[in-house]
Image: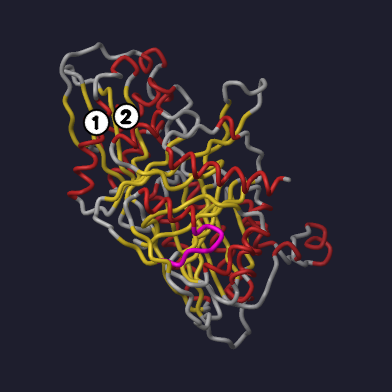
């Protein structure tokens, strides 16, 4: 859930805002100690913003966003006050003792109270502070003995399938552990409370398959996008001894029917390239490959690598339209005109390349940033281009690189004419092609480009469909050119 509100730069707003964040963080799963630490960090930043970001008699407002996921709660404070860099105003214990100079103490406290504290200077778009606190839950191995977790349900001749409920959370976590050990890429699936919370908040829906004795042997879920009316077929598992029984087919069909009934416009999958199994399943049900995202998940060991060497996991984006789309009108950058046309045509969509209109750019771009701290990746989403686009992107890159983010992806709106002008700049900044993200943000199509800091051996990136192979070739050529 995301909560956004605007506050005046008045000292009276600090206490009720901090009190709200404290109580809200308790509801999201933080324990009392962590909730108090988060509240203290927010208190310090809010106080500095209200007292020092603006002129003494200046009346202004600033924005506060509170975002929570299964793993963390994040408070974002964005203001348009005077330029300020916390790194140039660090706290000094010596100055505090000798001179009673406590400059920088507020941000020092915020850094120590938060699990992560980020500062973004966005030029004309102001300053942004991000305060993050991790949410901890019991791992499935802390609830059950390993012997019980590894016990495989007996084979059966008949299975039942039903929609997933909150009561299924523990069985799902046990099924994940029994089938994958510790190797499943989405760590939250080992925590029953996180699964239960996601279902309770309506963040996903799915199906569960059980044996005649009621033992869970299959699970498949759709994660709902918070930014568009689409969903990701993002969690799937079949118990080892029950594979080859048609359970995957049964579950996928049920999910597609449920997605249509809920009015979703499309489904997508992030199919790992460690193998092609999930890509083949997607292709069987009409999904079409649209992008290759390098290093989207944390590293994993690959067969054939030298001992101890790892490579971040890449994914193929496969998309299934649940509505009829015969034609799209978009602005195709000349650098990617050919490949984007092929991707659209592979989905059965006719492309009309709009002519660039002479349109005056607004002063400010509309850009949002989503950071996955656990995966070490970030997606920059451009909603509207403005004159400050290049400046904003450079500043975001500078901050993300300092925070050791390994994969940076940027989604560019194909309904904005200025997209044809920004590709050379992004390539100079180290971005290469990734692919098409259909209906990904506000039901609109986006071009994704990617900047990856790690090295990749493309021999270990396995893709299945002919379209995925075409996209891989394009990505590889740009990656090789960038590295040369």
Q: Which residue position is annotated with label 1? A: 208
Q: Secondary structure at mark 2?
A: helix
How busy is the neighbourhood of tag 2: few (under 14 within 10 Å), some, or many (20 plus)?
Answer: many
Question: Is residue 336 a member of the stretch shown in magenta?
Answer: yes
User: Residue at point 58% right, 30% down?
Assistant: 459
Left or right of 349 on screen, residue 476 = right
User: Residue at point 65% right, 61% down?
Assistant: 107
Quadrant where the N terminus is found in the figure: bottom left
Furthest toward the bottom, the residue is 57
Q: Position of residue 347 (x, y in %)?
A: 34, 49
Q: Earlier in the sequence, mark 2 or mark 1?
A: 2
Q: Which mark is residue 351?
A: none
Tell me which segment is drawn in magenta: 330-337
Residue 90, compared with residue 183, is above or below; it is below
Question: Is residue 269 a member of the stretch shown in magenta?
Answer: no
How busy is the neighbourhood of tag 1: few (under 14 within 10 Å), some, or many (20 plus)?
Answer: many
Q: Which mark is residue 172?
A: 2
Q: Position of residue 130 (x, y in %)?
A: 56, 59
Left or right of 213 on screen, residue 2 = right
């Amino acid at each position: 859930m995301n909560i956004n509100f605007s506050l005046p730069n008045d000292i009276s707003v600090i206490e009720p805002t901090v009190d709200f964040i404290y109580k809200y963080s308790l509801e999201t799963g933080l324990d009392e100690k962590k909730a108090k630490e988060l509240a203290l960090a927010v208190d310090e930043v809010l106080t500095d913003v209200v007292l020092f970001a603006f002129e003494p008699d200046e009346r202004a407002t600033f924005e506060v966003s509170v975002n929570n996921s299964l793993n963390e709660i994040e408070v974002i404070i964005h203001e348009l006050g005077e330029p300020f860099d916390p790194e140039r105003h660090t706290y000094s214990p010596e100055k505090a003792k000798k001179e009673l100079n406590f400059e920088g103490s507020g941000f020092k406290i915020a850094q120590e109270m938060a699990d992560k504290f980020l500062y973004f200077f966005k030029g004309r778009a102001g300053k942004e502070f991000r305060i993050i606190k991790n949410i901890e839950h019991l791992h499935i191995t802390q609830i059950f003995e390993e012997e019980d977790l590894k016990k495989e349900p007996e084979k059966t001749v008949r299975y039942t399938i039903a929609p997933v409920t909150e009561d299924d959370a523990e069985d799902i976590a046990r099924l994940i552990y029994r089938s994958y050990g510790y190797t499943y890429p989405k760590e939250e699936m080992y925590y029953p409370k996180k699964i239960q919370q996601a279902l309770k908040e309506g963040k996903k829906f799915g199906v569960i398959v059980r044996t005649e004795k009621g033992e869970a042997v299959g699970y498949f879920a759709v994660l709902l996008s918070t930014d568009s009316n689409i969903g990701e077929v993002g969690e799937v598992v079949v118990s080892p001894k029950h594979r080859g029984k048609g359970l995957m087919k049964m579950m996928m069909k049920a999910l597609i029917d449920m997605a249509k009934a809920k009015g979703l416009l499309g489904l997508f999958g992030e199919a790992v390239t460690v193998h092609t199994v999930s890509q083949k399943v997607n292709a069987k049900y009409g999904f079409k490959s649209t992008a290759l995202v390098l290093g989207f998940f944390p590293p994993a060991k690959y067969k054939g690598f030298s001992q101890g060497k790892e490579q971040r996991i890449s994914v193929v984006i496969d998309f299934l339209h649940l509505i009829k789309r015969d034609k799209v009108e978009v602005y195709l950058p000349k650098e990617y005109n050919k490949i984007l046309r092929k991707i659209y045509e592979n989905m059965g969509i006719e492309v009309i390349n709009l002519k660039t209109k002479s349109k005056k750019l607004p002063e400010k771009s509309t850009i949002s940033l989503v950071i996955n701290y656990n995966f070490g990746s970030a997606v920059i989403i451009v909603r509207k281009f403005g004159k400050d686009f290049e400046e904003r992107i450079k500043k975001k890159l500078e901050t993300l690189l300092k925070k050791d983010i390994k994969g940076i992806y940027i989604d560019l709106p194909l309904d904005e004419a200025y997209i044809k002008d920004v590709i050379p700049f992004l390539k100079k900044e180290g971005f290469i092609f990734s692919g098409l993200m259909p209906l990904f943000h506000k039901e609109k199509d986006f071009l994704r480009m990617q900047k990856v800091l790690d090295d990749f051996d493309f021999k270990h990136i396995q893709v299945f469909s002919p379209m995925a192979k075409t996209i891989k070739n394009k990505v590889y050529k740009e990656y090789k050119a960038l590295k040369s």
